[in-house]
Structures are given as C-alpha cells and as structure tokens.
Amino acid sequence: MNTTKSPLLQVEQVSLSFGGTAALSDVSFAVVEGEIRAIIGPNGAGKTSMLNCISGFYRPQQGRILYQGQDLTKTPTHKVAHLGIARTFQNIALYTGLSTLDNLMAARHIHMKQTVIASALYWGSARREEVVHRQQVEEIIDFLEIEHIRKAVVGALPYGLRKRVELGRALALEPKLLLLDEPMAGMNNEEKEDMARFILDIHERRGITIVLIEHDMGLVMDISDRVVVLDFGRKIADGSPDNIKQDEKVIQAYLGQE
Ligand SMILES: Nc1ncnc2c1ncn2[C@@H]1O[C@H](COP(=O)(O)OP(=O)(O)O)[C@@H](O)[C@H]1O
Ligand SMILES: [Mg+2]
C-alpha cells in the first residue's frame, strides 16, 4: 500500500474531556484513501469517542479533524453524512419497527433529500428517482446476502442479522469513508467470519476506506492495513499489524486489563 499518498482523513492533536474525564488526549493519526485502519485498545480507551468526533457527534475541545481539507470538528453532524462519511454504532441504531428494505430506503431518503429533490426536478418525476434508489438498495441487499429478510421487521431479527442490516444502512449512504464501531461484537465465530468477509468485500469491490474498531485481535490483525492503539485516551502505538503485535506498550496495556 502506498502510504505516501495524501491522507483522506487527518486527526490532529485531538483532545476531548467530559467534566474531569479525559476521553481523548492529544491524539493524532491519518487515514489514507483505500486502507482499512483499525483502532484498538482496552474498554474506556476512547475508541468510540474518537469515532464520535469524526462523525461530528462530539466536539473535541482541542485539535482538528481534516477530511479532504474540511475540518469536521466545525461541520454539523447532518452535513458529515453528505460528505460521504457513514457509520455503524456499538449499540445498533435502526428503525426497529420497519423492515430491512425500509431501513435501507430511509437511509437513502434522509441523507439524500437534496439529491432527490434536485433530480426530481430534472427528471420531472420523483418516481424515477425512487426506482434508482430501490435498485441501489436491492444491490446492497443482494451483496450482504439478506434477501431472505428484506421484508422482515428489523426489531425481530437475531442480533447478528441486525448488525448486517445496520451495515447495509451505512452502505445505502454510498460512503467514501465507513466508520465501524465493533461490527463483530457479540457474534458467534461463523457470523464474525461472514462479517469480516463483507468488510473485505466492501473495501475491495467498492473501494471504500474503512476505520474499524474491533476487539477480536485475530480478526483485526488479519484484515487491517494499519492499527492505532489507544489506552486511557492516549495513542500508545501506530503501525502495521506485525509491528503492533510485538509492541511492548501494547502488550502491557492489554495485560493490564486481564
Ligand atoms: N457522553 C459521555 N459522557 C461522559 N463520559 C463519556 C461519554 N462518552 C465517553 N465517555 C468516557 O470517555 C472514556 C472513553 O469512552 P469510550 O470512547 O466509550 O471508550 P471505548 O469505546 O474505547 O470503550 C470513558 O471513560 C467514558 O466513560
Ligand atoms: Mg466503544
């Protein structure tokens, strides 16, 4: 991988605290276009907080997060999705009363309203646009192998499938950068392998850059290009999976948790 390319995302000296708790302290790292960038670290290390800062949900007190030259710390959350950044949540966020299909269609409508209106005017018909949305959503359903649950109410689905639908919802936004917060947490081994395969496919076939938070070290080391390690809100290591595995500070941080 060519890491001399200019980064798609640049996190610069970000600090975030809640009252007296420092969730992130002076964290910097870059994400290069086309890579799978993992963020790992013990519970409470600040991983989710970092994603929340990137998606504009939290505002760090210090630092900048540049995405294609634009500072995300000054960008309203709803605009971040329009920039091509989508995410999944550690605790699944879906419309539990709606079907799989409707959850994916809703994602397209909410985040692409401007496009819908613009093209409705252009085509003179909103119907045409609806057909295009529908086709794209059907492609995602096909890709994630969830045809059998396309009409199923999401709240009634088993956990592993809900996680997959949530990934579909994020893909429906057609992101350039996808932020995944523990996409395999709580899954059995087979579900984890399926999810890893989908993540790799998304990356390879769709060329989407991925920031991945995950606890399963075997999987992280297998599928990511580079790894950032956080501990108590600080970055303690940053490098290739092979380097990270041998890093004394990283080993210490994980041993300390056992
Ligand atoms: N909204 C919040 N209010 C108060 N404290 C928070 C909030 N979000 C995160 N924290 C604190 O920030 C620290 C980092 O949390 P988090 O980013 O969730 O860690 P991780 O995802 O690595 O487990 C923890 O001490 C957590 O309690
Ligand atoms: Mg977390």
Image (cartoon, rainbow, N blue to C red):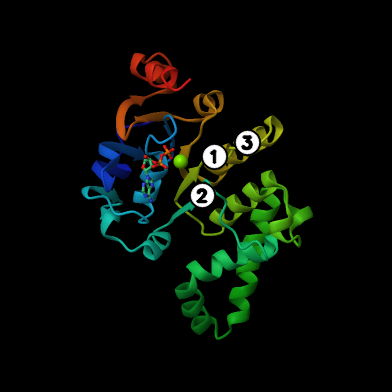
Instruction: Kindly indicate the quadrant of the structure image that contains residue 30.
Output: top left
Mark 1: which amino acid? Glu
With 69 as the anchor, is 50 left or right in this view?
right
Q: Residue furthest front?
A: 20
Residue 204: image tag: 1
- The residue where tag 3 is placed is 197
User: How far across and how far down the image is residue 239, in percent?
Assistant: 36, 24
In terms of image quarters, where does ligand 1 lie? top left
Marks 3 and 2 close (CB-CB < 8 Å): no
Q: Residue at x 44, y 51 (%)?
A: 176
Residue 65 in percent (x, y) is at 28, 48
Give the label, 2 or 1, closer to the camera: 2
Quarter of the figure with the N terminus: top left
Element type at mark 1:
helix
Give me the disc on residue 89: 2
Q: Earlier in the sequence, mark 3 or mark 1?
A: 3
Q: How many marks?
A: 3
Q: Secondary structure at mark 2?
A: loop
Task: Say which quarter of the image contains residue 227.
Answer: top left
- Determine the residue positioned at 67% across, 48% down: 144
Name the amino acid, label 3.
Arg
Answer yes or no: do the residues labelled 2 and 1 have beta carbons within 8 Å?
Answer: no
Residue occupying image coordinates x 34% and y 54%:
58
Q: Nearer the viewer, residue 52 or 133?
A: 52
